[in-house]
């Protein structure tokens, strides 16, 4: 689902960008070490391109393929990343336009909870990852989406959402097994983790 105006403002501002570049990058370095160094990384839901910047500048990816369902966000990302080794397109997490086993890693900066059929998105992530490939994720649990603020101010899907354990179980169902434990941040309002394709 595309973001509404409130969500766009919350996700597309200098504070959010600084948070991704510093705090979130540190979380993923702790989870993945230098696993992304020199790798081809797919970013699911690139927004205006800050996540792709983080993958290249902070986590050492050699190149990034990224897509978003929102054409206007892809255009902003193109402007931001025109001098970087990034391939951008409009796309759908439930039908990823990449060959099977073609990427070294997949990054989900809080996108899967926006997808109505999130299990299909997980299936697609597993499909495009090479054996031994890594998926890194940052997600919001069901209970956060059920709060008054999220129900009133956002357009997230309401049915078929997940808690951290349910998300990990779905990853495992597709051969993506946890690397370490899932971390909770901001009082459990956000969870982050890593899983490797067996």
Image: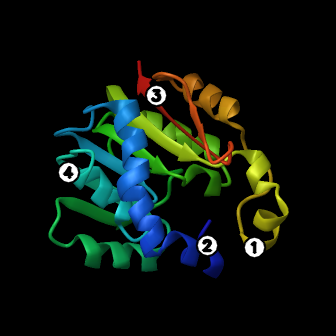
Image coordinates for residue 15, horizontal then vertical, percent:
46, 69
Query: Which residue is located at x 60 percent, y 29 percent?
Result: 168
Question: What residue is pinned by disc 1?
Answer: 153
Q: How many marks?
A: 4
Question: What residue is pinned by disc 2?
Answer: 7
Query: Which residue is located at x 67 percent, y 48 percent?
Result: 189
**Quadrant of the image occupied by residue 68:** bottom left
**From this viewpoint, is residue 115 visible?**
no
Q: Residue furthest top?
A: 198
Of the pair 10 and 166, the residue shown nearer to us: 10
Q: Is residue 140 left or right of residue 126?
A: right
Q: Is residue 88 left or right of residue 186?
A: left
Alpha carbon distance from label 2 to label 4? 28 Å
Question: What residue is pinned by disc 4?
Answer: 63
Q: Are marks 1 and 3 in contact (CB under 8 Å)?
A: no
Nearer the camera: disc 2 or disc 4: 2
Q: Are marks 2 and 1 in contact (CB under 8 Å)?
A: yes
Image coordinates for residue 43, horizontal then vertical, percent:
38, 52
**Quadrant of the image occupied by residue 115:** bottom right
Alpha carbon distance from label 3 to label 4? 20 Å
Please tell me whether residue 98 is drawn above or below residue 50 in the rendered image.
above
Question: What residue is pinned by disc 3?
Answer: 195
Mark found first going from the N terminus, 2 or 4: 2
Please tell me whether residue 162 is drawn above or below residue 56 in the rendered image.
above
The mark found on residue 40 in the picture is: none
Alpha carbon distance from label 2 to label 1? 8 Å
Alpha carbon distance from label 3 to label 2? 28 Å
Query: Which residue is located at x 54 percent, y 54 percent?
Result: 111
């Amino acid at each position: 689902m595309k973001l509404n105006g409130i969500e766009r403002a919350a996700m597309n501002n200098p504070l959010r960008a600084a948070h991704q570049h510093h705090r979130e990058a540190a979380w993923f370095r702790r989870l993945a070490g230098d696993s992304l160094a020199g790798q081809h990384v797919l970013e699911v839901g690139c927004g205006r391109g800050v996540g792709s910047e983080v993958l290249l500048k902070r986590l050492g990816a050699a190149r990034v393929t990224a897509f978003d369902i929102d054409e206007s966000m892809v255009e902003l990302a193109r402007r931001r990343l025109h001098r970087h080794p990034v391939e951008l397109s409009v796309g759908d997490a439930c039908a990823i336009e990449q060959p099977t086993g073609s990427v070294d890693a997949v990054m989900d900066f809080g996108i899967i909870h926006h997808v109505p059929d999130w299990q299909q998105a997980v299936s697609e992530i597993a499909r495009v990852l090479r054996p031994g490939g890594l998926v890194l994720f940052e997600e919001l649990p069901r209970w956060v989406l059920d709060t008054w603020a999220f129900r009133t101010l956002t357009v997230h899907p309401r049915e078929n959402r997940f808690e951290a354990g349910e998300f990990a179980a779905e990853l495992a169902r597709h051969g993506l097994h946890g690397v370490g434990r899932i971390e909770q941040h901001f009082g459990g309002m956000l969870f982050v983790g890593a899983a490797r394709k067996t």
